[in-house]
Image (tube, helix red, strand yellow):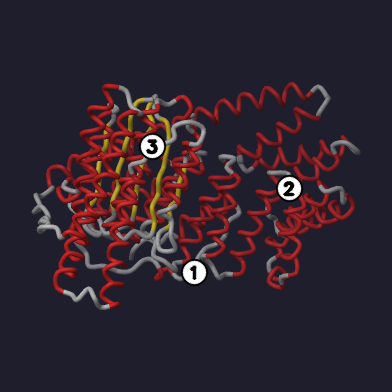
Amino acid sequence: MFRSPIFIFLLLFSIYSCDNIPKDKTTLIKEKPKTVNSIEARKLLDKADVFNSNQKFDSAYYFYNRSKIIYELENDSANIAYNLIQMASMQQVLSDYIGSEKNLIEALLYIQQGSPYKSAAYNSLGISSKELYNYEDALYYYNKAKINTTDTIAQIQIVNNKANIHIKQKKYESSIQLLEPLLKSKILETNEVRKAKILDNLGFSYFKNNKYQDGLSMMLEALSIRKKNNDIYALISSNLHLAEYFQKSQPQTANEYALNAYQISKNIHNVDSRLESLSFLIAHNFEKKSNQFAVEYIKLNDSILNVRNNAKNQFIKIKFDSEQNRAENLKLTAQKAENALQLELQKNRTLILSFVLLIGATITVFIVYYLRAKNKREKIQTSYNTEIRIAKKLHDELANDVYQTMAFAETQDLSSFNNKETLLNNLDTIYSRTRNISKENSTIETGINFIPNLKEMMAGFNTEATNIILNGLDTINWSSIENTKKITVYRVLQELLVNMKKHSKSSLVVIFFKINENKICLDYTDNGVGATFDKIKNKNGLQNVENRIQAIKGTVTFDTKSDKGFKATISFPI
């Protein structure tokens, strides 16, 4: 039997209180004929599961990644997603939330529309964003998770997760507005554990919103339910909330609750909760033991940081090595494709010729203006590249329309009102295309408006049919980046998105920015139809991408196959 993502989501949701778990495995996993590759991939997956269950995460990650690569050859989207989600879960356990985010976003490319696993993946993305303090992103992902599930319990949990974000933001009134309606749900009467979560969070929000008595009553009720159900992990949260409640009015009682949380965390080896409990005891315990708590906190924190940092580095190395191997294999197996036939323009009629001359005059004015804005070295290179690009766009995007309009003018009776209207409409279309070409090649603002303008440009490609997810753009200090490189980033993203719109038929595009070893790295992924390697190299837009990146001493790698989407990995020095 095939593996199901049920296992991984049980792990994820037991740790992070997210239980949006679909019960029907067949919604994602379907039996496929056995092949040599699929048998090998299954063996690797089984081996990874064993390592994972024994908490040997580096070995498990290695074999999940190898299994995923082989399943990609088989176009087995279900098992690709399974491996990615398993990898993301281990990264969350070890606090590698950025790496987890990336694998979950990639998994979304393989999960079919309507699958309940889509909601679970978005919910996990919300968790990673929350742990990275990207609260607005977390709310966005939780909203996407809620939209993609009809399960009542799952929706209650997602709303509770959103309320937790508002608590983190100290927006207690917003949290209360989300949580109060949940208590009216009849389904909570048969699910005491879930009810206790709502009561504890709502009680804490009441307390922070100066409704002390109501807040205390709810938090104590939640504590009682959790003791009754032996909900050990949740008892930590209850004790810490009550410790904060009593810290000013009854310090001794507050310390007792904090010590309870600390002891439970220690008994169940929950490092994060143990650190949180120690932090409270250090801050509010004035007895002699406070120094002992501080020493323990420092030792524990240093130890866990070392473990997690080593794990993150190992995950990155495993992924990097596999990507290098994949790139080499693609180069060895790529085949040559025929160049697309180009249409030639016939002789222009007087009306069409005049219009084309007007287009040429407009472009010439633009080129002159563009060249004057650059220094002497950039003028020569940019002039050459711009002329080639504009000539190609005129040929590809206007030639056919001009030819058809000429043929229409030659063969139709232009004294007819309807024919005149058709001719004018055709000319208007040509004018609109010309204006768009001019706009695409206009001057790019590289000052404080660079990021807003870049986002506005990308938003133009975000439609009902195509969803664009952007991550990491705001984490880079663009004011310190050279203007030439900012212009290159703008034009490269524009080329990739235009290529996506014209050729790939994508429903999801993911653009991810990060800084790695004094380099800016840009990962572009879409789930479109893809192509062979030689075909994408023959697309002029992608050739422009490669030329631009090389001009700023960067590198670009294209990764694509027919019906398997398109990826571009770009890096250049800061």
Quadrant of the rendered image containing residue 464: bottom left
Quadrant of the rendered image containing residue 293: top right
- Give 440 or 426, whichever is nearer the viewer: 426
Q: CA distance from mark 2 to mark 3?
A: 42 Å
* Residue that appears at 24% across and 55% down: 355
Number of other residues with Cα within 10 Å of mark 3, as a class: few under 14, some 14 to 19, many 20 or more = few
Q: Is residue 391 left or right of residue 321?
A: left
- Dot 1 falls on a residue whose secondary structure is loop
Q: Which residue is mark 3?
A: 443
Residue type at numbered disc 1: Lys
- Give 289 or 557, whichever is nearer the viewer: 557
* Residue that appears at 44% across and 69% down: 114
Q: Earlier in the sequence, mark 2 or mark 1?
A: 1
Contact between labelled residues 3 and 2, with CB atoms less than 8 Å apart:
no
Residue type at numbered disc 2: Lys
Residue type at numbered disc 3: Thr
Find residue 169 and report its horizontal and vertical position in percent. 69, 44
Q: Which tag is nearer the camera, tag 3 or tag 1? A: 3
- Dot 2 falls on a residue whose secondary structure is loop
For the N terminus, give its image quadrant: bottom left
- Dot 3 falls on a residue whose secondary structure is loop
**Which of the numbered marks, if any, corresponds to residue 171?**
2
Q: CA distance from mark 3 to mark 1?
A: 54 Å
Q: Which residue is mark 1?
A: 23
- Give 498 or 355, whichever is nearer the viewer: 355
